[in-house]
Image: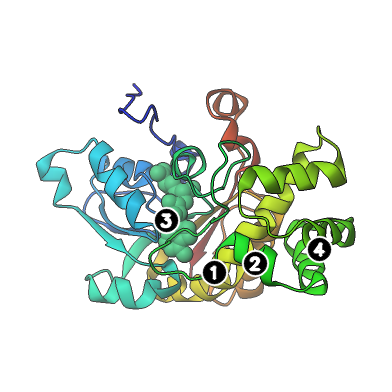
């Protein structure tokens, strides 16, 4: 049952929830780390199954919003620890919080529906919001507007080629430079429409994605975190990662393949995707891919 709060926002729907619970083999008394706590959808379900969870979340405002919406009893709350921090430091955070050895770790990458729709940080196309895109505005310095307005044409071309895999990266960078300063999401959309045409939402979304990845250094942070996560797993413990675009999926796949037979056995030979029914309920699930590996 979804409940609206006074900001009109309904809960973030956790993606591939049943699959995550199955693949993580959640059992009472075992410890788990949710490296991207968000609104706690996955954590809550693990707790309901008797697990104990350390949730890590980079966005302090998300933690405040999530706490208002958690549906767990006082008793269950004792099995949940939420820490404000980046999963880049998952090893030190976990050891500090008494989660030095765990049965399963989940990464559900990217942003939440709340961040997209309600954070006002320019993740979406509408609403004339400042072009921010930082997950943690209090601790990160560089906004998406600064990335666009301060980088050279060449650096922007490279960034858009790498993080959006956009063939017209040079044209996009030219348009960005010509229209600077660009300080709002709607201004960025109109500049991108001038390059791609008004109905090319996919191309526009990919450039937004590129800015978000650059602002939050997402691929580097993920690359750093995966081996750290492995070091926290018990033998037989599982690492589950949900990705939403090919760049992050590639990082996860390469890591799992590289470490296969030595550190991990791969549980999902092909990535698990959402059922049709789930994609009807939650369109975000359409691009989700779940990969799971077990520590050996
Ligand atoms: C897709 S949402 C997770 C949703 C969550 N599984 C749920 O069901 O509510 C991803 C979350 O990861 C957070 N995040 C992004 N980068 C992070 C990082 N480096 N460390 C910790 N959290 C991060 C985002 O702020 C966002 O809240």
Ligand 1 within 8 Å, label 3 CB = yes
Residue placed at 40% from the left, 30% from the top? 9
Q: CA distance from mark 3 to mark 2?
A: 25 Å
Q: Which residue is mark 4?
A: 161
In the image, which disc is placed on residue 147?
Answer: 2
**Front: mark 3 or 2:** 2
- Closest to the camera, between mark 3 and mark 4, is 4
Give the foreground label among 4 and 2. Answer: 2
Viewer-proximal residue among 246 and 173? 173
Q: Label 3 crowding class (10 Å Cα cut-off): few <14, some 14-19, many 20+?
A: many
Horizontal and vertical percent position of residue 104: 39, 59
Outermost residue on the left side: it is: 75
CA gap between label 1 and label 3 equals 21 Å
Contact between marks 3 and 2 (CB within 8 A): the answer is no
Residue toward you, 206 or 76 = 206
Mark 1 — residue?
142
Q: Is residue 239 visible?
A: no
Q: CA distance from mark 1 to mark 2?
A: 7 Å
Return the residue at label 3.
36
Q: Is residue 118 left or right of residue 156?
A: left
């Amino acid at each position: 049952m979804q409940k609206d709060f006074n900001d009109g926002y309904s809960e973030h729907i956790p993606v591939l929830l049943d699959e995550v619970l199955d693949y993580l083999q959640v059992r009472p008394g075992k410890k788990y780390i949710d490296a991207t706590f968000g609104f706690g959808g996955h954590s809550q379900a693990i707790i309901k199954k008797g697990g104990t969870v350390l949730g890590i979340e980079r966005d302090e405002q998300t933690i405040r919003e999530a706490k208002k919406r958690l549906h767990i009893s006082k008793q269950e709350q004792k099995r949940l620890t939420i820490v404000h921090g980046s999963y880049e430091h998952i090893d030190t955070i976990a050891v500090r919080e008494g989660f030095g050895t765990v049965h399963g770790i989940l990464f559900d990458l990217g942003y939440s529906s709340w961040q997209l729709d309600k954070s006002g940080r320019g993740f979406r196309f509408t609403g004339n919001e400042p072009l921010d895109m930082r997950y943690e505005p209090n601790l990160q310095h560089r906004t998406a507007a600064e990335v666009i307005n301060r980088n050279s044409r060449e650096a922007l071309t490279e960034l858009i080629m790498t993080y959006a895999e956009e063939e017209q990266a040079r044209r996009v960078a030219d348009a960005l430079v010509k229209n600077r300063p660009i300080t709002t999401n709607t201004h960025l959309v109109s500049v991108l429409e001038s390059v791609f045409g008004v109905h090319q939402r996919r191309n526009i979304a990919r450039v937004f994605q590129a800015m978000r990845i650059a602002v939050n250094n997402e691929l580097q942070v993920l690359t750093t975190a995966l081996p750290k996560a492995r070091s926290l797993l018990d033998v037989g413990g599982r690492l589950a990662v949900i990705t939403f675009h090919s760049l992050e999926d590639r990082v996860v796949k390469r890591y799992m393949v590289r470490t296969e037979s030595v550190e991990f056995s791969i549980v999902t030979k092909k990535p698990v995707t959402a059922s049709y029914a789930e994609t009807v309920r939650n369109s975000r699930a359409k691009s989700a891919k779940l990969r799971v590996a077990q520590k050996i």
